[in-house]
Amino acid sequence: MNLITGLFKTSIGKKFIMAVTGGGLFLFVIGHMLGNLQIFLGPEHINAYGHFLQHSPEILWPARIGLLAFVVLHIWSAIALSRENQAARPVGYRNSPAPVAASYQSRVMAMTGLIVASFIIYHLLHFTAQTEAVNFTGYDFKHFSDHRARHDVYHMMVVGFSSKLASSFYILGMALLCLHLNHGVNAMFQSLGLKNAAYAKLIERFALISSGVIFVGNCSIPLAVLAGLLK
């Protein structure tokens, strides 16, 4: 019980919570990307994937609840740590480049985090809740079905990304997400005590390459739709 209390009351515990939840969300982003990339295999593959998820509540709902818990804990720990840092430095440092750099990184992470959170809400309304008012196409995605009477995820994504406004916002959201991930993955290993002089460069390269792969992989879908490669 004391261990759990320590996680939520101490700075080290909050950093640990942020690192673990960030790592979990990072893995989810990769899995989500791999699932969406099935669109390049054709309608049958991604529609079967979507049908499987929609008809597996024993998998879908625990995953959704777990993700929501991770998001809430990640945001809470970030806000709590930010307040602690501000309280510890009410005036701020002068003539000290390192704290200024750290402060800049913190501000960037906070800014990108808020924008990414807004993007996630939009993304959920766009393709998960299928809210017609936000898709900018005039179509109701809920009525899309394929020849097997399954929800036509392929057609939904093609029509959804045919909107230049939606695709532009998606690409911008991905850019900010990957900027957030690049710094976040580095911070995660550091908070878990796994980043040292021997592995620092390797971890930094992993963070940069993985965030780049996520950006290219996710953005390839709206770009392919806009280029007419997916119809």
Image: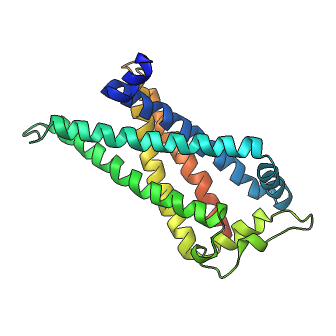
Residue 206 in the image: x percent, y percent? 50, 34
User: In this rendering, would 71 be left or right of 136?
Assistant: left
Q: Position of residue 191 (x, y in %)?
A: 39, 27
Q: Quadrant of residue 170?
A: bottom right
Q: Is 163 in front, or is 19?
A: 19
Outermost residue toward the front in this view: 1
The one of 181 and 212 positioned closer to us in this rendering: 181
In the rendered image, residue 19, in percent from the top left (x then y), is placed at 44, 32
Question: Could one spot residue 204 in this view of the protein?
Answer: no
Residue at the extreme bottom of the image, as rendered? 138
Number of marks in picture: 0
| 87 up-or-down from 3: above or below | below
Q: Going 59% across and 78% down the picture, which residue do you hit?
A: 136
Quarter of the rendering occupied by the C terminus: bottom right
Q: Is residue 59 left or right of residue 67?
A: right
Which of the pair 20/96 is nearer the observer?
Answer: 20
Image quarter of the N terminus = top left
- The relative height of residue 34 versus residue 185 in the rendered view (above or below) is below
Residue 117 appears in the figure: yes
Image quadrant assignment for residue 157 = bottom right
Residue visible at 44% across and 27% down? 189
| Vertical arrangement, residue 190 with respect to residue 25, above or below | above
Residue 73 is drawn in which quadrant?
top left
Residue at the image point whose x is 38% and y is 25% from the top: 13
Residue 109 position, x and y percent, is 35, 47
Q: Tell me which residue sits at (34%, 49%) in the image.
A: 110
Taking the image as shown, residue 8 lies to the left or right of residue 226, namely: left
Q: How is the image coloured?
A: rainbow
